[in-house]
Image (cartoon, grey):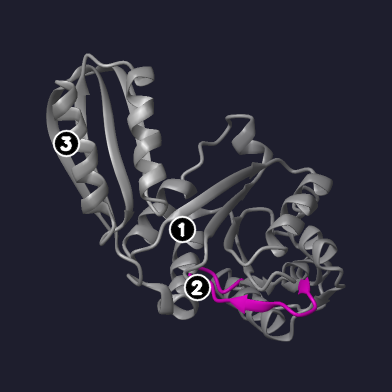
């Protein structure tokens, strides 16, 4: 079966409003392009205990989870340490990560016209960005070579850790999807079929929604009310979604019952992935 995909966003700056999260819309876009979908997202501040709990929950599942942020080497970066704690593993300097970080430091020294001094305290500190849980595998970073990392948990799923910077994180997430998740691409085509319903109350439509979900256990029924839509004004978008081969029968029940109720209907919408 196709695993569920999750997202963890780490950082006080998101929760305080100093920065707006751009990761979730992009991850949804990247997944949708591959016939996949995002099942959930968690926002976590720079609190080690809370980050560890969140990662422990992720490692206990069979899900594929992307964690963005907090993998640097400043005092407010806790994600690497929390991942190790959640797995019960020590942090160790990953040899390939260390080599890549040293290459990056050499590049910077060359660009500045200075000699590379590997033993300088600040350069030694930068190697902390390559200390990962003991069984971690690296995720390449084409932007500046400093890698992310992936870990598999007891539940069989994996958490993939990338920086908070979109310019680095998004290509790294794409790399993980294309190199480790391709077997699930477009495996279970999904369809969403909905219609605009004018002048109805959700309470009046609820019995129909319950009936459809009872009749089609693999189908989800959704109701999206709007009070100030620029085109349709006050309305409800009512629809069904699920496996493409299951949606038509559920849709026929939905639209047929709406017609029998004398509902005032607007445009229909079909979305596929």
- Residue 20: x and y, percent? 51, 36
Labels 2 and 3: the sequence-earlier one: 2
How many other residues sit within 10 Å of disc 1, few (<14), some (14-19) or many (≥20)? few
Above-or-below relation of 180 to 3: below
Query: Residue 101: where, in percent of width, then height?
Result: 66, 76
| Residue beneath disc 1 | 167
The stretch of residues the image draws in magenta is 132-146
At horizontal 79% and vertical 43% (from top left) the residue drawn is 47
Q: Earlier in the sequence, mark 1 or mark 3?
A: 1
Q: Position of residue 22 (x, y in %)?
A: 46, 45
Residue drawn at (39%, 60%) of the image: 31
Magenta span contains residue 145: yes
Of the two numbered discs 2 and 3 in the rendering, the one whose residue sits closer to the viewer:
3
Of callouts 2 and 1, the N-terminal one: 1
User: In the picture provided, is 142 more to the left or to the right than 256?
Assistant: right
Residue under numbered circle 3: 256
Quick check: can you spot residue 80? yes
Closest to the observer, 154 or 219: 219
Distance, label 2 to label 1, CA atoms, is: 15 Å
Q: Looking at the image, which residue is at 63% across and 37% down?
A: 13
Does residue 10 belong to the magenta stretch?
no
Q: Which mark is residue 176?
A: 2
Q: Residues within 10 Å of mark 3 (few under 14, many from 20)?
A: few
Left or right of 87 on screen, residue 70: left
Q: How many marks?
A: 3
């Amino acid at each position: 079966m196709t695993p569920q995909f999750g997202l963890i966003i780490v950082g006080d700056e998101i929760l305080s409003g100093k920065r707006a999260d751009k990761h979730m819309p992009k991850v949804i876009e990247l997944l949708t392009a591959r016939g996949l979908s995002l099942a959930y997202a968690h926002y976590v501040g720079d609190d080690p205990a809370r980050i560890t709990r969140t990662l422990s929950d992720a490692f206990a599942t069979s899900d594929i989870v992307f964690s963005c942020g907090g993998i640097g080497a400043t005092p407010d970066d806790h994600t690497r340490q929390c991942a190790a704690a959640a797995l019960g593993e020590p942090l160790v300097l990953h040899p390939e990560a260390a080599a890549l970080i040293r290459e990056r430091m050499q590049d910077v020294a060359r660009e500045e016209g200075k000699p590379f001094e590997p033993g300088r305290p600040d350069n030694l500190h930068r190697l902390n960005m390559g200390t990962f849980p003991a069984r971690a595998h690296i995720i390449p970073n084409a932007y500046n070579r400093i890698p992310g990392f992936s870990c598999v948990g007891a539940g069989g799923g994996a958490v993939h850790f990338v920086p908070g910077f979109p310019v680095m994180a998004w290509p790294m997430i794409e790399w993980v999807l294309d190199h480790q998740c391709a077997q699930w691409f477009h495996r279970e085509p999904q369809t969403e079929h909905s219609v605009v319903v004018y002048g109805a109350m959700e309470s009046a439509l609820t019995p129909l929604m319950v009936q459809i979900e009872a009749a089609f256990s693999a189908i989800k029924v959704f109701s999206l009310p709007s009070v100030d839509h620029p085109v349709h004004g006050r309305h409800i978008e009512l629809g069904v979604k699920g496996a493409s081969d299951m949606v038509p029968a559920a849709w026929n029940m939905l639209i047929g019952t709406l017609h029998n109720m004398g509902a005032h209907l607007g445009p229909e919408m079909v979305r596929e992935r």
